[in-house]
Image (cartoon, rainbow, N blue to C red):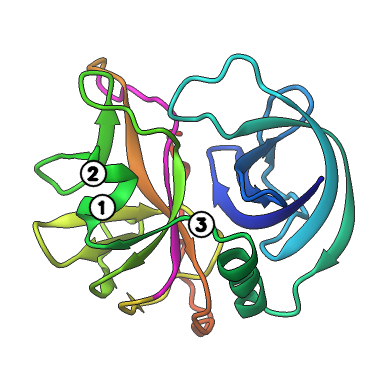
Amino acid sequence: MDVIIVSKTHMSNASCVGGVLANGRFVRLLDSNGFNQASDTQLEVGDVYTITFSERNDTRPPHVEDILLNSMEHKFSFSSIEKMVQYLTEKLKVNIWRGSTEVLFDGKLQWTSGGSGYISESGEIPDNSVGFWVPDKDLTRKDYNEKVRYSYPIKWRNISFVGFQRPVDKIPTGTLVRVSLARWWSPNEDEERCYLQLSGWYGLPEPEETNDNPIDDLPF
């Protein structure tokens, strides 16, 4: 089956690579042993591969997208990100959340006092851990503790950016973005949570290169 690579995000010592299968299913591409891709993986957004895979048997919701790659062969790469988005939306008709942060993950997110979105076992668990979103307000870059975050202007919402793209100062209203939930994590021996993160955006021009180091080692 063919898969379109739609995201690549930083993890502590690896890359989390997301895709959409030819049947429209969201997947996360693990190696045959169940590990994430290497930090220097050659997989890039817009690539299309023909793959064989098996299901991961020990998934923990909401991370139900994991598949184990048995083989993969590069088929082609979309000539532009815009053409990839057109294919995803018009041919595969992928689901897209549209509106405020309240629509993300079917409204099941909780929010910290600092504006971070998360789910926990004490709350509702969504059906999946990734998705596309078209926000109804600009998302503005507001770094915190040397990490890149994007702020939604209502109800104090902040989303950490974990993608490989060079950060932009503003993601305009109506831009297609990809969001995900990090793996289960308990930072202070409290309840385990999955935090909302921004994987990337589509169709914006690349900003000029700076000396910023937007991503430090992440705990997830």
Which element type, helix, strand or loop, lies under badge 3? Answer: loop
Label ID, residue 107: 2
Residue 145 visible in the snapshot: no
Image spot of residue 108 (x, y percent): 24, 37
Magenta stretch secondary structure, dominant: loop
Which element type, helix, strand or loop, lies under badge 1? Answer: helix
The residue type indicated by label 3 comes to Gly
Residue 30 visible in the snapshot: yes
Quarter of the figure with the N terminus: top right
The residue type indicated by label 2 comes to Gly
Q: Which residue is mark 1?
A: 103
Residue at 24% over, 39% down: 109
Question: Seen in the image, is 3 located left or right of residue 219?
Answer: right
Residue at 63% over, 46% down: 17
Residue 123 vertical position relative to residue 215 in the rendered view, above or below: above
Image spot of residue 182 (x, y percent): 42, 37
Question: Seen in the image, is 217 located left or right of residue 99?
Answer: right
Q: Which residue is mark 3?
A: 163
| C-alpha gap between disc 1 and disc 3 | 22 Å
Question: Seen in the image, is 171 located left or right of residue 71?
Answer: left
Tell which of 81 and 160 is nearer to you: 81
Image spot of residue 160 (x, y percent): 34, 52
